Amino acid sequence: MLEGGKVKAIYELQGKQSIRKIAETLGISRNTVRRYLRDPDGALVRKPRPKRPSKLDPYKEYIMSRLAEGVDNCVVLLREIRQQGYTGGHTILKDFVRPFRRRTVQQATVRFETLPGEQAQVDFGSFAYRTADGQERRVWAFVMVLSWSRAIYVEFISRPTTETFIRCHLNAFAKFGGIPKTCLYDNTKLVVLSRDAAGAPVWNRQFLDFALRMGMEIRLCRPYRAQTKGRVESGIKYVKHNFWPGARFTDLEDLNRQVLAWIDTIADVRLHGTTQERPVDRLQAERAHLLPLPGPERLRPFQRETVTVGRDGYVRWNRAWYGVPWPWKAGQKVQLEAIGDLVSLWSGEELLAVHPKAVKAGQRLTHPKQWSGLPPTPGGRRLEPMAVQLPTVEVERRPLVFYDLVAGVTSR
């Protein structure tokens, strides 16, 4: 197609010069001059080419629905649409999503590097979800990141208590294969209760005892300075933008199985943007610099969680109920220890009950002596509380021999 200036010159020279002369003057062919002279109404103006179909077209409606839900991470979107059959590349997806992404203002910070085994950073993230009936619920994610290798550990819990906080640490140390020399925290009350008049921290004694037994040092970041523990802050954002958008789960155990699989197959095997190495490879090198894990005797006091006996003689843990023998009454405190497929209930060093771990939410596991010795009612009958209060609840009973066998194996 001719540029506009030559087209205009053809019409100006028409009648003044021959077609041959016009062609020589403008440096074009005579056939071109003839086509334009035969087309005074501009029919030869090039029409825009029809838009070629894109491999992304069948998935744009799904992508827009995910963008409306706040999911604009192209890594997540690419993973999801490839599961649906998309065979295109990453660039075309980024170009499509770019106009819809939320813009953030970046602030400059100074990066501090640490030595292998020197530091881990710890924090909690809050994650909201909707149940099948439309109710909004929330879980908490314990996140620990080793500062040198960038290896990450994530565990979801229903509520952050000192006992669950300690248990999450133990699980993280077991996953990493050792203990860092220092753990960095914000000013959560799970670590520091307050500060005295001189500004010195008043520690949570239970957590301080745990740290001393582990041989690790507690360090606090500056208040309102999230950048001080930027690695774990980035880790929480990574979980929110890369794992959480695709999470579909039935309970906490299911969710935690999924997040551990995500760590092993995605988070720790990706090429990290800062180190340009895979966290799993750096973790192999860092393990030699971590402190060794203590023996089971030193860990045992921290593997238990304090629970309260209900009116019906059960304690509630992980959405299931476990019975204790009479006369442990409502309001009394006992300690629960979950190891493998067994859940045991203790009062100090006295073993009260051992149950198999519940396999589904709402399950009740009754101790054979749960109501033995319960005083009779004024009418002369002794009613088991569960038979009256919750007649439709599934209650699992087991013979005494099961508890005797298990208690013999687990008693200490």
Image (cartoon, grey):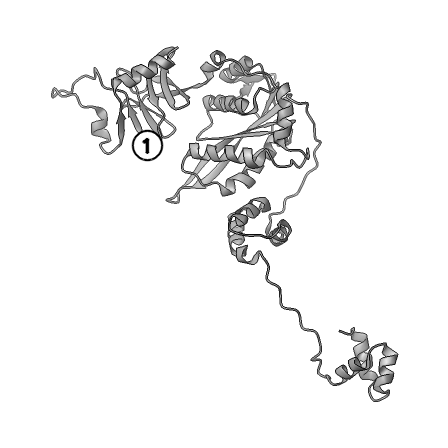
Q: Amino acid at mark 1?
A: Gly
Q: Describe residue 314's horizontal placement relative to residue 137 as left or right.
A: left
Extreme bottom residue here? 15
Instruction: Tell me residue 391's x, y (percent).
Output: 22, 32
Name the residue at 34% across, 19% down.
Answer: 354
Q: Residues within 10 Å of mark 1 (few under 14, many from 20)?
A: some
Using the rendered image of the protein, determine whether residue 150 is visible from the camera's viewpoint.
no
Question: Residue at horizontal 18%, vertical 23%?
Answer: 383
Quarter of the image holding residue 267?
top right
**Residue where numbered disc 1 is placed:** 362
- Foreground: 371 or 87? 87
Using the image, determine if residue 303 lies above or below residue 321.
above
Front residue of 98/94: it is 94
Q: Is residue 391 left or right of residue 215?
A: left
* SS label for mark 1: loop
**Residue 36: quarter of image:** bottom right
What is the residue that sits farthest to the left in this orientation? 379
**Can I make out residue 404 in this image?**
yes
Above or below, comparing residue 227 to residue 191 in the picture:
below
Relative to 237, residue 409 above or below: above
Q: Position of residue 280 (x, y in %)?
A: 61, 30
Question: Which residue: 78% across, 74% down?
Answer: 2
Q: Is residue 42 left or right of residue 144?
A: right
Rendering coords of residue 130 (x, y %): 43, 42
